[in-house]
Each structure stands twice: as structure tokens, then as C-alpha cells.
Amino acid sequence: MTACLPPMMVPGMLVSNGNSHPMMAPSSHCLSSFRGSGGVAMAEASHASAAAVANGTGGIQRTQNPIVTGASVLAIKYADGVMMMADTLGSYGSMGMFKHLQRMHAVNEHTLLGGSGEYSDLQYILKMLEQLRIADFAAADGATLRPSEIHSYLGRVMYNRRSKVDPLWNQLITAGFYQGKSYVGSDAQKGMCE
């Protein structure tokens, strides 16, 4: 797991002129006394991340504006199930750049996810859902996430990212059929669930 830290001063960190910042002189309470799970000092990772940010070569990358987008996802709920359809065009600005992007994905045996908006953010969401599915499988308790639970989870993820001023630029439709009941829900970029 990789983490990029925001620009900050770490005790003993060297500033660009090679000298230690006077307010951040090394102390006995330095972060280097803590160790991560891999045995690497956390302060070393902090130094590397802070130095990368100072050099302009690293740091937190956020989607400021959607680049590759797709627009059309539609789900219809009926008595015996749910039907979902989506276009496959990925637009780069106003140009139709990618003709065969998959915008509908199976989350588990009961749930489909359809997403419009920024494609890289959709890939990020799919990775999160895959980690959730693996954790669910590893629990080996026979329980499976229902479509409504996945919809609720995605709503919290979208709201959390919006609250951090780092929104996911997507509109999502969660559709599924579980224990004889159809389910359709939507999540917007602002974390509103319907």
C-alpha cells in the first residue's frame, strides 16, 4: 500500500537549501521511532513524500476536471428483475476517443454497477468494490453483500470524497436482484443517494 502525504514539515526535515528548518529541529520524539508493518521507518517515508512534493515530482494527485468521460447509463426495474444498459463511448473532451469502454460491471452474483463520468474514477471505485468483495469472501460466513448494501456503501464513499474536496466525478447506478426483489439505486457525485 502506498500513501502520499500532503506537504508538511517533518521533524529534522531538510528544506530546499539543505538546512534543517529552525522550528523543526530533531528531537527525541521524532517520527523515526515508529515503524510501519514492513519494518521501514515511517519518518523515512514521510521524508521521501515531503521531498517529492517540495521538488514538484510527487504528492497528492486529484482529478480537477473529468478528462475521459462517458454519459449514458440507464437501468429499469421491473417485476421479475432489472435491465441495465450503457453506451461504450469514452469522450476525450468533445472528441469520441475510445469506442469500446465497459461502463457496466458485475460486483457480485446479485449486483451490477453502471457508471457515467470520469473513467479513471470509475476504475478506482471498481478496485474498492473488488477489495470489498474479497473481504466478504474471506470472511467465509456464507453472507453476500446485497444490492442495497453496495448502494449505501457507494453513497458513503462519494460523500466522504466530496467532503475531502476530492470528489469522484461519477454518477453511479447500482442495480440488482436479491431474494426475489428488484433493486435500483443511484449515487451522485455529491454523495446523494436515491
Image (tube, grey):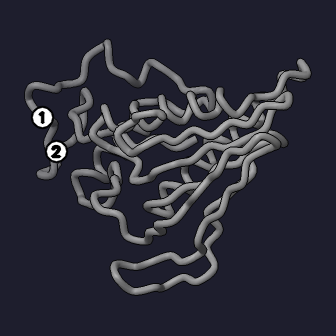
- Which dot marks residue 21? 1
Image coordinates of residue 5 in percent, x first then y, are: 35, 39
Measured from the top left, where is residue 101 in percent x and y?
A: 61, 73
Instruction: Specify few, some or many for label 2: CA neighbours under 10 Å numbering under 14, 14-19, or 20 or more.
Output: few
Q: Nearer the viewer, residue 78 or 3?
A: 78
Mark identifier at residue 51:
none
50 over 92 or under it: above or below: above
Q: Do tag 1 and tag 2 residues touch (Cβ < 8 Å)?
A: yes
Percent of width and height locating residue 54: 22, 52
**Residue 57 location, quadrant:** bottom left
Q: Earlier in the sequence, mark 1 or mark 2?
A: 2
Q: Horizontal placement of 149 versus 48: left or right? A: right
Residue 56 visible? The answer is yes
The N terminus lies in quadrant = top right
Q: Circle 2 is placed at which residue position?
A: 15
Q: In this rendered view, identify the residue nearer to me: 47 or 112.
A: 112
Front residue of 53 and 111: 111
Task: Look at the picture and state if 1 lies above or below 149.
Answer: below
Query: Marks 1 and 2, how far apart in space?
Result: 6 Å
Q: Amino acid at mark 1?
A: His
Residue occupying the point 73% across, 47% down: 82
Residue at disc 1, secondary structure: loop
Task: Say whether residue 177 is left or right of residue 141.
Answer: left
**Which residue is the extreme one toward the left?**
22
Which residue is at a point 55% across and 27% down the rendered structure image?
36
In the image, taking residue 146 as reference, residue 157 lies left or right, namely: left
Type of amino acid under label 2: Val
Q: Quadrant of residue 98?
A: bottom right
- Residue at image coords 26%, 31%: 10
Q: Is residue 148 above or below residue 49?
A: above
